[in-house]
Image (cartoon, rainbow, N blue to C red):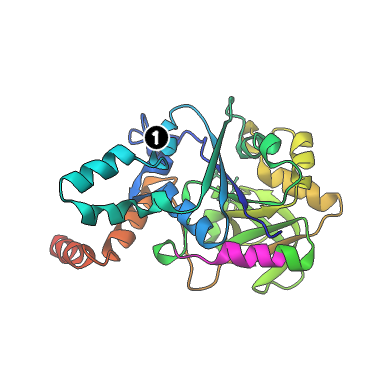
Amino acid sequence: MSIDLAVVPVAGRGTRLLPLTKSQPKEMLAVGRSPVVQYVAEELHRSDIHRLIFVTGPGKAAIENHFDTDNELIQHLRETGKEEILQDLSFEREDLEFFYTRQRQQLGLGHAVLCAKPLVGDQNFVVALGDSILGVSAQSQVVRTMVEQFEQQGVEAVIAFEEVDPEEVVHYGIAKPKGDVDAVFELADLVEKPSVDEAPSQLAVAARYVFSSKIFNCLERTQPGKNNEIQLTDAIRMLIQDGGRVLGVRLPETERRYDIGSYERYFEAFAEFALADPDYGPAFRAAIEKLL
Ligand code: G1P
């Protein structure tokens, strides 16, 4: 059976977005008309992923509430003649199943993924970071391509990459490719947040991964690394050292990654999505032009 399961880590504190994230999850911040994590769920749904395991943490209950079917609200909208608004809740009716587990200690992204092990077992699965939107208007197809590559090539992992400016490498996992870099390429190694001088390329991990369950064994053996956290990047490295083949898939030219982890990126993403809004975009554009 093709992969239909994704782990969505949403446990990070969002400290770079304080005070906004003091009492609300960064994954619930609005980008245009939807919260970030809704775009992630819709992207996965379009890629035929129907079961989502959220790895949550303190203060993240709003995410669970957001994906509930709110019958009271639906009834209220019907009774007050606001049926047209029901369309805005259509994401509630998508055939997605949600599961939640908690990362009880903040030990890093690798540890968050490991928390899903009892629910994933020996299935192949996607990891989609809950604070990153992919593709213009969130229409990315990259997960579908990654799953196809994973299944056709019989590898242990496939990772999405985006080329970043040299000074940006310090924020991401960076690929060391084996041989030529085409749309799909093989990885020789991966380095978490290297310095500009140490970076083996400018290809940055772009928030989407496909794994076989072997990654759990590597995660269990991974010691704390960068920032004293158990890094997913280090476990992937171990997977390669153990002889596993790992592929990179570059985001196509037409796609972008919107990383909602800092104000710089957040403002940019909000403006781009608001400008592209079919109903409110033109008026927003006119308002912005007046301000400039
Ligand atoms: C994480 C990963 C990093 C990756 C980034 C964006 O970093 O550790 O390798 O490039 O997500 O996908 P974080 O943003 O959690 O610091």
Residue 152: name its quadrant. Answer: bottom right
Q: Amino acid at mark 1?
A: Ala
Dot 1 alpha-carbon crowd within 10 angstroms: few under 14, some 14 to 19, many 20 or more: few
The answer to whether residue 117 is above or below residue 193 is: above
- Residue positioned 56% across, 38% down in the render: 99
Would you name the residue on which mark 1 appears?
62
Q: How many marks?
A: 1
Position of residue 123 measured from the top left corner of the image (x, y, whole percent):
73, 48
Q: Residue at x 26, y 67 (%)?
A: 278
Place of residue 11 in the rendered image (x, y in percent of width and height, measured from the top left) = 52, 35
Report the span colored magenta: 139-149
Q: Please check the rendered image and state whether residue 140 is part of the magenta-colored stretch, yes or no.
A: yes
Query: Considering the numbered disc 1 on the image, is that residue within a helix, a strand or a loop?
Result: helix
Regarding residue 244, the answer to whether it shows in the image is yes
Observer-nearest of 205 and 42: 42
Q: The N terminus lies in which quarter of the figure?
A: bottom right
Quadrant the C terminus occupies: bottom left
